[in-house]
Image (cartoon, rainbow, N blue to C red):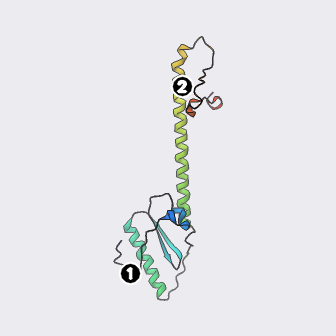
Amino acid sequence: MKLDWSDGQAVLLRVAADEIDSLERFRGQSEPVFLFILNTRVINVFRGVDYITFGEVAKKEIEYYKQTKEGCHIERQTYAIDEATPDEIEWLNARKTEKEELVANALALKASRQEARKKHRAELMVPHLRHLNFVLYWPHTTHAHPELYERWDPHS
């Protein structure tokens, strides 16, 4: 990325988070994350692909750097590279909640489909089984799909 406004004071490096242990919190995602690092400490984190906003944030960080270089002391919270910022913690918790909701929705959908299948099969069999009283058993289905096995307690 060409940074005409940085005067050579900003260096962008692309690193693979999968290969660096201190960046493991960024693994398994496709959203770009920019860490602003000064003196081995993270001073800001920018996530996303909004390059206009990224440019504004980067310019602001360069201004902070220039002020620090001129002797102005600006009190800012810094973090170790392997430490998550409060914004990151909030973002990671939101992602975890989203994943849990997706899993719960998938399980609920699977259960409702299984229930509908069983009801449909029962409706097809009932007219033919009015005078019979038996349990269906297929000895050859020892490796059948788990949804084919009846679970009497939850589905009775």
Residue 7 is situated, as x and y percent measured from the top left of the image, at: 37, 82
Residue at x-position 52% and y-position 47%: 102
Assign the C terminus to one quadrant of the image. top right
Assign the N terminus to one quadrant of the image. bottom left
Residue 86 higher or lower than 73, as above or below? above
Is disc 1 surrounded by few (<14), some (14 to 19) or many (20+) residues within 10 Å? Answer: few
Residue 29 is situated, as x and y percent measured from the top left of the image, at: 48, 58
Is disc 2 surrounded by few (<14), some (14 to 19) or many (20+) residues within 10 Å? Answer: few
Q: Nearer the viewer, residue 146 or 138?
A: 138
Secondary structure beneath dot 1 equals loop
Of badges 2 and 1, nearer the viewer stands 1
Q: Amino acid at mark 2?
A: Lys
> Label 2, on which residue?
119
Residue 8: image tag: 1
Residue 121: image tag: none
Instruction: Determine the image quadrant of residue 137.
Output: top right
Q: Nearer the viewer, residue 53 or 104?
A: 104
Residue at x-position 37% and y-position 68%: 52
Residue 11 higher or lower than 84, as above or below? below
Residue 103 is situated, as x and y percent measured from the top left of the image, at: 54, 45
Q: Amino acid at mark 1?
A: Gly
Secondary structure beneath dot 2 equals helix
Q: Nearer the viewer, residue 16 or 102?
A: 16
Alpha carbon of mark 2 to alpha carbon of mark 1: how far? 69 Å
Q: Earlier in the sequence, mark 2 or mark 1?
A: 1
Residue 47 is situated, as x and y percent measured from the top left of the image, at: 46, 64
Residue at x-position 38% and y-position 81%: 8
Q: Tell me if 103 is positioned left or right of 9 in this view.
A: right
Residue at x-position 46% and y-position 80%: 64
What is the count of numbered marks? 2
Residue 97 higher or lower than 62, as above or below? above
